Amino acid sequence: MKKKKIRVIACAVIAGIFFWFSFVFSAWSQDISTMPPFTKKDRVLILAPHPDDESIGAAGSIQRALRVGAKVKVVCYTNGDANELSFILYEKRLTFFKKTFLYMGEVRRKETLAAMKVLGVDPTQMTFLGYPDHGTMAILTRYWGTVKPYRSIFARVTQVSYPDALTYHAPYVGESILSDLEKVLLDFRPTKIIVSNPVDTNRDHRSLYIFLRVALWDLEKKIGRPQVYPYLIHVVDWPKPRGYEPQLRLDPPSKYVGMRWTQQTLTQEEVEKKRDAISQYKSQLTYAPGYLYSFARSDELFGDYPALVLKRQVGPDLKWQDIGINISKDEEGLFSLEKDDDSDGEDGAPQRTTVSDPDKISYLAFARHDENLWVKVVLNKKIDKTLGLSMYLLGYSKKTDFSVLPKLHISLGTFGVKVLDKQKRLRDNGVQVITKNRTFVVKVPLKDLGDPDRIFSSARVVGFPYETTAWRILELDPSFETASQPYR
């Protein structure tokens, strides 16, 4: 019996050592840094696309900030009033009426107040913006200027319809969202911002990140450069296992190559209180209890991509800068402006590409040549009547108001190329597309983007259920390089 006990203890010790080494090796291999500690001088702004995201993504960090005496403010971007399936399960009835969806948004607002009370956040530290659930990406890319405001899918309204919102009756246009975010930033003047991630599959999560970046660039001279920590929530098959597993960590999804990760380790008490905060969202737990509780673990994970700096190239060749979709550096290749691209394999795809992304894009790279932006996309499948390629390019310039800058949507399909600037189709533009089997090289004159300093970019395959390609920031460096020299 004693020998059996000794063997059990020895196995437990070995397992513990193995777990510890696995923990250290995983953190090292993923290059995860530790989140700097909050201080009493910090002003921490939490931005949530929907009610519950602030608890799922940052309840532990909220507790940590409050404990040291930092100022905390929580802002909800939408009231989450378009989650119809969860509402049906929660209320046990079908609904088609506008008032019912607005009622759902009010239910979720009250749940957020209850969750924040658990964490110690006072209602005076909270702000609701009331923009349309599932509609903010459309507003970002299409609804600017004198156009009719966006009309929400289920509530069927065109303006902020919650009396307690920051700007009641604000029209659903990009200027309204940007103005509200800038009001929040100027009033609170945060030192740290916790926000949704640009790789998240939910469009509201992505658009909030982009609107925030624009607001921060606009206000840089007034509020400085707060540290930004994007949390990740909606990813296919992540995290695993599902359910409340407080002893486990949130490890980074392996597919996001090149993302810089930061980790906030939580105490057992912080994890338990995070679970208690999540439990206040009864309208959402009815639909997906295991999923929401999966984020109450021993750490909180934040990650962001560094901007891709594009130098101005000269000469007859382009040197591609890839965004790291699991490919080798020697696959970047050169692209000749005077002849066909000979750097690809026989079928037009870069050789030795090893990973098939969920969005079916195996290679994505950029280059800047003189006054043109070049984008190279390689798909895992050929475009056909059920499959197309969609690309967004949004310019940003310190010299020009973001609202008037072009926001290009380039669509490629079996019927050719279509270019939209917001809602207007551009027929007389300089966009050119070179195709070779599964390879697409797109040339976009920078003047068609408003001669920007920075560009938000996203490419995705049309025809699949998730929009999974990350939004990336391209910075246009005014210095020169020649394409015959390797990029460093």
Image: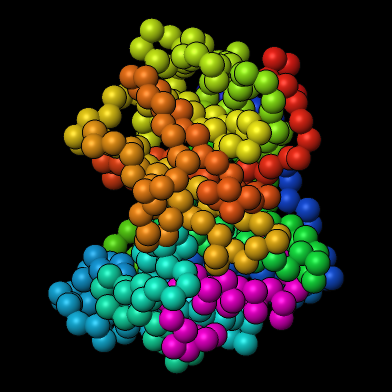
Q: Residue shown at 78%/69% (left/top)? A: 223
In this rendering, position of residue 44 left or right of residue 297? right
Give residue 95's position: percent from left, percent from top. Answer: 17, 77
Asked which quadrant contains residue 17, the reply is top right
Quadrant for the C terminus in the image: top right
Q: Is residue 139 above or below residue 462?
A: below
Asked which quadrant contains residue 329, the reply is top right
Q: Is residue 32 above or below residue 243?
A: above
Between 302 and 90, which is closer to the camera in this rendering? 302
Q: Residue shown at 22%/77% (left/top)? A: 91
Q: Is residue 110 above or below residue 355?
A: below
Q: Decide if residue 32 is in sight here.
A: no
Is 146 one of the magenta-colored residues?
no
Give residue 371's position: percent from left, percent from top. Answer: 63, 38
Give residue 427's position: percent from left, percent from top. Answer: 36, 48
Between 50 and 349, which is closer to the camera in this rendering? 349
Q: Residue furthest front?
A: 428
State which region is magenta. 165-193
In this rendering, position of residue 421 left or right of residue 41? left
Between 114 and 72, which is closer to the camera in this rendering? 72
Q: Residue furthest top?
A: 346
Q: Residue shown at 17%/77% (left/top)? A: 96
